Amino acid sequence: MTTPLPRNRNYRILWSGMFLSEMAGEIAYIAFPLLVLAHGGSAAAVSGVAAVLAGARTLVSLPAGALADRVDRKRVMVATQGIRTVAMLSVAVAVLLGDCPLWQILLVAVIEGAAAGIFVPAENAALPQVVPEKMLPQALARNAARPFAALLIGPALAGFLFGLHEVLPFTLNTSALAVSFAALAALHLPRRADAPPADAEASASAAPRAGGFGLLLRMPTIRATMAWIVGVNLAFHTLVVLVLIVSGEENVAPGQMGLMMTCFGAGGLAGALIADRLHAAALSPGAMVIGSTWIFAAVAGVMAYAPRGVPLGILLGVAAMAMPVANTTVITCQLSAVPDALRGRLSGLVGLGSELAATAGPVIAGVLSTGTRDGAVSMLGAAALLVAVAVGSTLSPALRGLAPAGPSAARQPTRS
């Protein structure tokens, strides 16, 4: 008899550990710049800290994926959370003592970004070890709610606590990571199966040789879904940054801009609930991914002419609702097509594509904004990017026929 997710102890621990990790990351992303500015740091210093956080994650994406396939995933998760806890504790202590130099902030930012980047592939690859294959879509839909919940809670807490005392957000960050460390230490991760994959596509990648990423990219399902992930992330990050730029240029009040981002997070949470129901209804995976992409494009086009402020934020939230639906479908099909021995590499590859798209998106937004000098036209440029992705998705045989591969590429893991 299959254990429901709410009663699956190991899934609860994995979900909670990752949520605390993501919330800590959101707190750090806000608290570090606030600390630099509070002590007279320049805009260049603030940008440097943000770049170091993002850059460290990007650089470790592929090695972290390979590591998650070669060593015990629980040990990777516990070790990285322990390292992050100690690093953030050093900042909290330094702030409490009244002297946290920029070099220490940059060093901890490197550690935080790299350790978080190593943690994620191990956590993602461990999910099928604790959740039966038929429940993966439901688990992934619930996981899709985590980053949006962290986005709603983390930055608000960081700003509020920093206003009370500079040390408080770093204390909360350290505490969240410490609790995550303790929870993951109690995780019972089943042994990984060593059996060869059952289907032909996965069998091509059964042996995790050095690298292994080329093997993944030779699989049609992975190539098509990776192209979709990069394209959608690139266009969506471009759109979000343009929304902020246009709102600032048109003198939208800061409070309304905050509400706009709240709508974004709330939309993502609602989308995670919808994704769970749609997967339960057994709708066509290809139709859900392609349909969601066209929804992105249509909403982006409407946003170009929508009133600025909260109405624009509501539309952004509608677009965000479609993200978990498409993402959970894509990840479910990816995991079912790839054997356990390569799932860490898969997560690293996806992470690298997402991080590069997240980095390039703001650059494209700046080019569009500067080149057009018209908010509506620049946002239509982002919509055009989404239309291009939607057309490519519609024409892709691999995406039109997207479906879970059936029997897992590796046998169900046994209990340790």
Image (cartoon, rainbow, N blue to C red):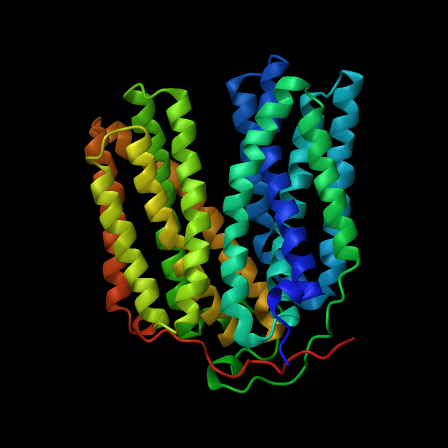
Left/right placement of residue 365 relative to residue 26 reads left
Query: Residue 363 placed where, x, y %?
Result: 37, 36
Q: Position of 287 compared to 55: left or right?
A: left
When asked about the image quadrant of residue 153, the answer is: top right
In the image, taking residue 280 as reference, residue 100 lies left or right, namely: right
From this viewpoint, is residue 68 visible? yes
Expressed as whole percent of the image width and height from the top left, the position of residue 376 reads 20, 33
Q: Quadrant of the C terminus?
A: bottom right
The mark tally for this picture is 0
Seen from the viewer's position, the closer of residues 106 and 198 is 198
Q: Residue furthest top?
A: 40
Q: Is residue 52 visible?
A: no
Q: What residue lies at 70% left-to-right and 30% top-to-bottom?
A: 170
Q: Is residue 199 left or right of residue 7?
A: left
Q: Which quarter of the figure is the N terminus placed in?
A: bottom right
Instruction: From the top left corner, tell me how far across and down residue 374 is, in percent.
Output: 20, 28
Q: Is residue 408 above or below residue 101?
A: below
Q: Quadrant of residue 312?
A: top left
Residue 412, quarter of picture: bottom right
Q: Nearer the viewer, residue 199 or 206?
A: 199
Q: Against 171, is 129 above or below?
A: below
**Could you tell me residue 355's position as x and y percent?**
49, 47
Q: Is residue 336 above or below residue 289?
A: below
Q: Say which residue appears at 53% left-offset and 47% top-offset.
A: 147
